[in-house]
Image (tube, rainbow, N blue to C red):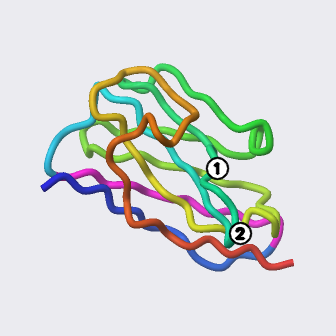
Amino acid sequence: QVQLVESGGGLVQAGGSLRLSCAASGRTFVNNAMGWFRQAPGQGREFVAAITGGGRGTSFADSVKGRFTISRDTAKNTVYLQMNSLKPEETAVYYCTARGRDYYISRRPQDYDTWGQGTQVTVSS
């Protein structure tokens, strides 16, 4: 069974940092793009960041550029999202996702095949 399991969410004050982890099991995604999306209550799923298969390329939403970084540890089959200078409006459930066959990044949730259960990030003002 293929699974993505997120961890690292929680409550943080505005300006603080969190590091999310996403561990894959059941198959390797070394050659597949992986990403993070977030969804606030009543909103659609929003692209945050993604990394290519192999980790050579990354892409970020404009709103998080310069504050968030994404990385992957291929040996551990894990992707990370480091979030700095967090803002209250970034309170949301953060989802890890992986493309089933593709190396390249997409910003569209419909292009991703496997999703984690999500981890709550709450930023207090």
111 or 87, which is in the foreground? 111
Q: Locate the N terminus and report the quarter of the image it occupies.
A: bottom left
What type is the residue that disc 1 sits on? Glu
> For the magenta stretch, what is the residue range?
14-25
Is residue 112 rendered magenta in the image?
no
Where's residue 81, x and y in %? 54, 50
Q: Compared to 43, does 56 lie above or below?
A: above
5 or 71, which is in the foreground? 5
102 or 66, which is in the foreground? 102
Task: Report how far apart the C-alphas of labels 2 and 1 lie in the structure.
Answer: 12 Å
Specify few, some or many for label 2: CA neighbours under 10 Å numbering under 14, 14-19, or 20 or more: many
Which quadrant would residue 85 be assigned to in this image? bottom right
The residue at which mark 1 appears reads as 46
Specify few, some or many for label 1: CA neighbours under 10 Å numbering under 14, 14-19, or 20 or more: some
123 or 71, which is in the foreground? 123
What type is the residue that disc 2 sits on? Thr
Q: Compared to 68, does 4 lie above or below?
A: below
Could you say whether the residue bearing mark 1 is in a helix, strand or loop?
A: strand
Q: Residue at x 26, y 45 (%)?
A: 76
Is residue 16 rendered magenta in the image?
yes
Q: Earlier in the sequence, mark 2 or mark 1?
A: 1
Q: Are marks 2 and 1 in contact (CB under 8 Å)?
A: no
Where's residue 61, x and y in %? 71, 38
Disc 2 versus disc 1: nearer the observer? 1
Disc ID at residue 91: 2
Q: Is residue 123 left or right of residue 119?
A: right
Q: Residue at x 55, y 36 (%)?
A: 108
